[in-house]
Image (spheres, rainbow, N blue to C red):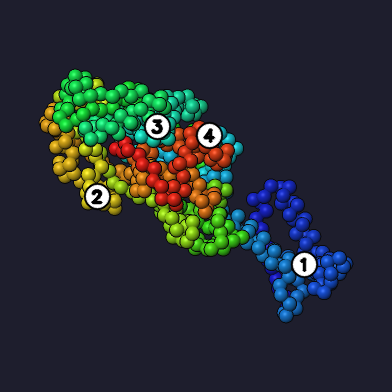
Amino acid sequence: MKMTLQLSLPFHLLRPATASALTSWLRHLCTSRQWYKKDANESKNDAIEPKNDAIEPKNGAIEPKNDASEPKDQWVEGLEKLKERFQEIHHRDVAFPYYADICVIGGGAVGASVAYWLKQRNEKLNVVVLERDPSYSYASSTLSVGGIRQQFSLPENIQLSQFGINFLRTMGRNLQVEGRDPPNPSFSPHGYMFAATEEGMDQLVKNIHLQRKYGAKVELLTANDLKQQFPWMNVEGLAGASHGLEGEGSFDPWAVIYALKRKTISLGGHYIHGEAVGFAFDKTLEGEFFGHIGSQFNRIDKVLVKMDSGEMRFVKAAYYVVAAGAFAKNIAEMAGIGKGEGLLRHVLPIEPRKRYVFVFHCPDGPGFDCPMFIDPSGVYFRREGLAGVYLSGRSPPSPDLEPPISNLDVDYSFFDNHIWPILAHRVPAFQALKLRSAWAGYYDTCYFDENAIIGPHPYHSNMYFAAGFSGHGIQQSMGVGRVVSEMIIDGKCVTIDLGRFGFSRIMLNKPLLEENIV
């Protein structure tokens, strides 16, 4: 019985020298009569006898002489695999980055920062960013109020914001692309003010001492100080407040994300409009099929990407960084995290929670001295521009008031029932405010302790997390991107030690609580 193998290889995709060498090798392979096969009874040191099966080319086809009872020769199987490989290459989009050093899943503020710092530190790295919403219409980053503050209760959070404020000061120079105007974050300096009742003053004072230890300029104000410096404020029920004097304010999130993306692309990075929908695992181990979790693998081999057109492609990388914000848990589950046993039984405790931002007008409200004010109830407001416009919001005061996350529709009754009464009490002028508009966005909430999860997964050693910022992602993104790049390139944290933010605290059930959550 004769077997015919037709070869149709796309040599035009190869370099001329490579094509020539491969052609010569195939010609020699197909015409040579020196096929060797070791006899099973021979020892390793015995001579190898040549196999005498003749192979003759006929009409452009390769016809190995083979008995029906004998298995297919290994060289024929190799040629078939080679043919399949070339056909696969032939149908690929040559402009698509199928192979990368690092693949970042999520191109919002955090993912864009990770990609930028990787390319900025080593321009030779091949970095690919997957983003399913390149317009950022639903991104948590662009739907945030764009605030940055140093008033936190954990050293890591203070340092991340300090890194961020310095980054904003220099981004016009560091993120400039030749031939383009320098980016402008439109930073508006105004302090944050955390007001406290008598019950909360001890924690407030403790926080101020820590913040000052790390160089933050924060003042402690009593109720009388508040009344004198901010006469528009009703201080009833307040014992005091902390007030940031510099390095705090608001900026344009879109401007920062766009500048990071543009700079990364100018350095050779790739952005793909596609969605990660599954993983393939190392073929040398079990669990190599998409969506199937085996028992022995420990390394992710490829990510399956659904393009905007619906076409399925893949990206094979050495490292994967999950910066998918509120939906990072979905990506983790594709890798079996929270679905398996042992190290895979621990879920990534991140979920989307919808938050509203309301825009109202009050011509007689606070002026230039208006900080980003956070009431003990959790209601916040700040001035937006110079025309008597303000932004306000609040996290739900109880779990039963959490809004549904199936869409980003706004429930205006939440403002009427849970925000406006407190605004009107704290600032009497706000009794006459008029609501203009509102929008909603997702917090990528780490419901374990409301702090980010940063670093590698203990089982999938080539998967890193940078998610779960619980509303602080835009202000911490610049520092986190730097640290994640250090974890991958240097193997350790250099700029800021974020070791306590790793996945291990989830496994050990040791929450790292942040007291100043807005």
Name the secondary structure under disc 3. helix
Viewer-nearest of discs 1 and 3: 3
Q: CA distance from mark 1 to mark 3?
A: 73 Å
Can you give x and y, in whole percent of width and height, for residue 168 in the image?
41, 27
Q: Amino acid at mark 2?
A: Pro
Residue drawn at point x = 39 percent, y = 35 percent: 154
Q: CA distance from mark 4 to mark 2?
A: 39 Å
Instruction: Identify the residue under disc 1.
Output: 57
Count numbered badges in the picture: 4
- Local packing at callout 4 (Cα closer than 10 Å; few below 14, some 14-19, many 20+) is some
Instruction: Identify the residue under disc 3.
Output: 158
Q: CA distance from mark 4 to mark 1?
A: 62 Å
**Which numbered disc flags the more N-terminal residue, 2 or 3?**
3
Residue drawn at point x = 34 percent, y = 48 percent: 447
Q: 195 or 267: nearer the eye? A: 195
Residue farthest to the left?
A: 432
**Which numbered disc flags the more N-terminal residue, 4 or 1?**
1
Instruction: Identify the residue under disc 4.
Output: 494
Q: Amino acid at mark 4?
A: Val
